[in-house]
Image: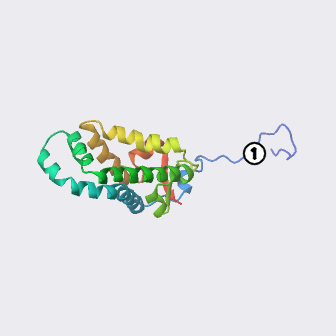
Amino acid sequence: MVTPANNNYAPPKSFVADVAAGEEDLAKATRGSRFAAAFVDGLIFGIPFIPAYIVSVPALTHLGKQNKYAVWAALAGSGGWFYFALLVSLCTLTVTAVLVYRNGQTIGKKLNSIKVVRKDGSRATFARIFGLRYLLNTVFGLVPVVGPLYGLIDVLFIFGAPKRCCHDYLADTIVVEA
């Protein structure tokens, strides 16, 4: 039985897809580009502290296995280098926060032409990126005994087929080519 096209009582005809468009349509960042971005970000935040470490080596060698706060006290006692490094890190953190807010990119991600987006491809908010991807991940890493294990598992998740780390799953984000 054939119903006429202008029949108001006929069932609607529409296309139904089983899978919504989303993550599969996006060009995901390679593992190498994600590693390079993390490495660059680590260098940017770590290099300013090198002079403070060099100046405080004599004080650090006498500490032995004392508590970790004594190391920070020795670094702070290294003179102006430590405070200069803190100032540079604060400025770098400000630039990074602006980039993350605007583009979903850190400095390393921008240099490697990758960015963080929501799983459906929409823009990830600043709160989602810093709060769920970085802050929550850092808090998990600070838990004694379990923290280092979580850090290892987080990094190893990148080798799965979806190319997503634990912090990507926590924030419901993916890293794609910009």
Which of the two residues, 77 or 33, is positioned nearer the viewer here? 77
Percent coordinates x, y for residue 122 in the rendering = 58, 49
At 66% from the left and 46% from the top, the residue drawn is 16
Task: Mark yes or no: residue 155 visible.
Answer: yes
Residue annotated with mark 1: 13
Q: Secondary structure at mark 1?
A: loop
Amino acid on which disc 1 is placed: Lys
Q: Along the line of sight, which residue is nearer the eye, 8 or 23? A: 23
Quadrant containing the N terminus is top right
Task: Depth check: give the residue in front, 142 or 9.
Answer: 142
In the image, residue 172 above or below residue 27: above
The residue depicted at 53 percent of the width and 54 percent of the height is: 24
Residue 20 is left or right of residue 84, and the answer is right
Task: Tell me where residue 92 appears, x and y as whole percent.
Answer: 43, 54
Q: How is the image coloured?
A: rainbow
In the picture as drawn, the residue positioned furthest to the right comes out as: 6
Q: In the visual, does 123 lie left or right of 16?
A: left
For this orientation, the residue located farthest to the front is: 79
Residue 170's place in the image compared with 95, above or below, is: above
Residue for point 45% across, 40% down: 132
Instruction: Give the quarter of the image for residue 103.
Output: bottom right
Q: How many dots with numbers?
A: 1
What residue is shown at x 52% (from left), y 53% (from top)?
Answer: 99
Q: Is residue 50 above or below residue 140?
A: below
